[in-house]
Amino acid sequence: MTRTGRKGNHRSKKKHIGLMLAPVVAAAVAVPLMNQAGAATASEVSKDCAEDSSKLENCQFVDVQFKRNNLGPNKRVSTVTDNCGSTSDATKSFSVSASVTRSITLEDGFTASADSKLANSFFEVGAKFNTTEFRIQRDDKTVGFAFSRTDTVKADHVAFFMWSEKRTDVSGFLKATYKDAQDGQKVFFAPKEGGTSVHVFYPQLLKSGTPDGRLWLRNVKCGAPQASELQNSSDGAGVRPGAEDGTQPGFQEGGPDVLDIEIPLSEIAAS
């Protein structure tokens, strides 16, 4: 009886030990999976690529899709001429200047330096979209135009020139190759492989080499909020630059107090 009892206890201990091993094995499997998930994140990839990190072997922008003739931010590109209080239209002189450059929007707002591996990749992708029909500015050099011309300012209005550049929007993702493997992996993507949230805007150029886009003369009724803002600016309405972030209303989107007249770009050369 005693032996039988001991055997029973021995079998019970074996079962107990066997049950304890199962979670240990499961934990061992989970560790590498957790490490793999904790490798380079999309934001880290964007930051390393933008800053040309020494940890990188290479970084590339991979294009997925594109859109031609994408209009950029609406900017004021001339001095403001005041004809407030007048009961008749007036002919006024304007000094107009605008410039464009390639712009890059990464996942976390980072931008690439001109001499980084990533910037070179942007140039190479741009070359692919530069055709006889669509000339684009591929590098980070700035191109623009400047001219003077006279135009009509309506009675009791302020007037100025507005500009919106035409761009080729190429969207895709970043492919980063690290010098040293992280958890057995050297290649990482941002935001993900096949993603389209990284945008590179290549300004489109006319055959003359000047920027392509929409140029228009905007007359704003005196007393309207937009006119008052320009007139009351601390540095003077004739000096203050336009909104660089695109907050200005677009062409024919200014409301009942705003009159927009488009100027053909062919007239710029003649001015």
Image (cartoon, grey):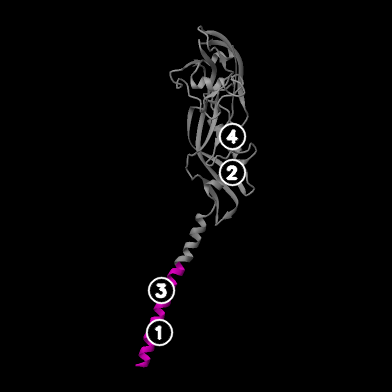
Of mark 2 and mark 4, the one earlier in the sequence is 2
Mark 1–mark 3 Cα distance, whole angstroms, equals: 15 Å
Find the distance from the CA under tag 4 to the CA under tag 3: 60 Å
On the image, the x and y values in percent for residue 209 come to: 59, 22
Please say whether residue 213 is visible from this viewpoint: no
Q: Which residue corresponds to mark 4?
A: 123
Q: Nearer the viewer, mark 2 or mark 4?
A: 2
* Separation of marks 2 and 1 at Cα, in angstroms: 61 Å
Q: Quick one: SS at disc 4? A: helix
Do labels 3 and 2 touch, CB within 8 Å?
no
Residue at which label 2 appears: 49
Of the residues shown, which amino acid type is indicated by label 2?
A: Cys
Q: In which image quadrant can residue 237 be found?
A: top right
* Disc 1 residue crowd, few under 14, some 14–19, many 20+, Cα 10 Å: few
* Callout count: 4
What SS does tag 1 mark?
Answer: helix
Are the residues flagged by discs 4 and 3 in contact, CB closer than 8 Å?
no
Residue type at mark 3?
A: Leu
Query: Which range of residues does the magenta coloring cover?
Result: 1-25
Residue indicated by mark 3:
19
Instruction: Categorize mark 2 by other alpha carbons within 10 Å: few (<14), some (14-19), many (20+).
Output: many
Q: Give x and y (percent) for residue 61.
A: 55, 40
The answer to whether residue 240 is above or below residue 20 is above
